[in-house]
Image (tube, rainbow, N blue to C red):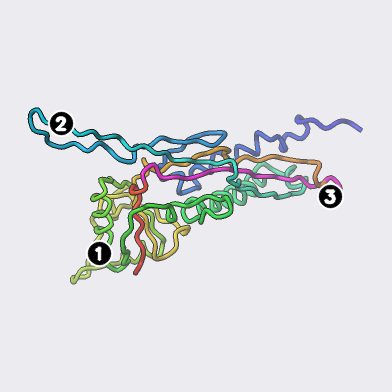
Amino acid sequence: MATQTTATLSTLQHTEIQQLLVAPLESESVFLASGPKIIDTNGPIRIPRISSGLTVGFVAEGATIPESSVGLDEVSMLPSTLKSLKVLSRVTSEVLRSSAQALDSILKQRLVTDTAKALDVALFSGAGTSNTIKGLLNQTGVATGTLDADDPDTLLDGIGVARANEVKPNRWFLSPADYLSIRKVKDNEGRYVLQPDITQAGQEVLFGIPVTVTAQIATGKAALADMNLVAVARDMAPSVTVDQSRYFDTDEVALRVVARYDLALLQPKAVTVLTAA
């Protein structure tokens, strides 16, 4: 019996299958596409941070100048105990030997979509329990406010909270239901209140700030953030490992997807979380 090689079984080459997952995930994941600071690392990292500045005041001529010190702390990410996102799937060899279009349909639609969704759920609303990701909405120390999807003024109040914290927000995150409720608000003459902002060409905006609408945020929650101060540590970009021996007796191929990320705020007040009363 002749030995099978990558020349005769080219559709099973690891590099070809991996490209279908890794490249599209950046665009499929709405959180990663929203512009966080992505840090590639293969182990735990600590980011130094100035927690408080110097106290500067007026001092009379010849008087003793008071001392003051800069407060320092750090942001820790990707501890060794943090779990990875993983899934194991299997397909028959007949499927992998079929056309490239069929292979693309199976892997891209299922692996990419499902992995991106799981990652987004964790990055937005993960509880951080049992060594998992603590999501944006559950981070400690964030600013807070009230959301009323029937009153756009509550969005302005949220911007006011961010500005009071010296934050220049550059991204809204809203659920589809809340976004549509806000979008439907009309004045006394039946005109959409947010029409001038929300229909700008090329992107959706609320009060001049781009909006990401995602089902991964629960109705009644919204976040306003400066994404330059939101960090995502990436240990392993989503990758596929192919194993032809696991299901040898059934002539199936195992596809294992692994990804490992963590999230932290470089400044907690960079995020304002609005919650419905």
Look at the image and give the residue range highlighted in magenta. Answer: 248-267
| Residue occupying image coordinates x 24% and y 49% | 163
Crowding at dot 1, Cα within 10 Å, few <14 / some 14-19 / many 20+, comes out as some
Residue 76 part of the magenta segment: no
Q: Which residue appears farthest toward the left when viewing the image?
A: 61
What's under tag 1, amino acid-wise?
Tyr
Report which residue position mark 3 lands on.
250
- Horizontally, is 236 left or right of 51 in the view? right
User: Which-is-in-front pick, marks 1 and 3?
Assistant: 3
Query: Residue 27's mark?
Result: none
x and y, in percent, of residue 265 in the image: 41, 45
> Considering the image in quadrants, where does the N terminus appear?
top right
Disc with the residue nearer the chain's start (2 vs 1): 2
Report which residue position mark 2 lands on.
64
Residue 250 part of the magenta segment: yes
Q: Is residue 259 above or below residue 223?
A: above
**Marks 2 and 3, how far apart at CA:** 84 Å
x and y, in percent, of residue 93 in the image: 77, 45
Q: What is the count of numbered marks?
A: 3
Report which residue position mark 1 lands on.
192
What's under tag 2, amino acid-wise?
Thr
Element class at badge 1: loop
Q: Which residue appears farthest toward the top when viewing the image?
A: 62
| Residue occupying image coordinates x 84% and y 50% | 250
Crowding at dot 3, Cα within 10 Å, few <14 / some 14-19 / many 20+, comes out as few
- Horizontally, is 113 left or right of 99 in the view? left
Crowding at dot 2, Cα within 10 Å, few <14 / some 14-19 / many 20+, comes out as few
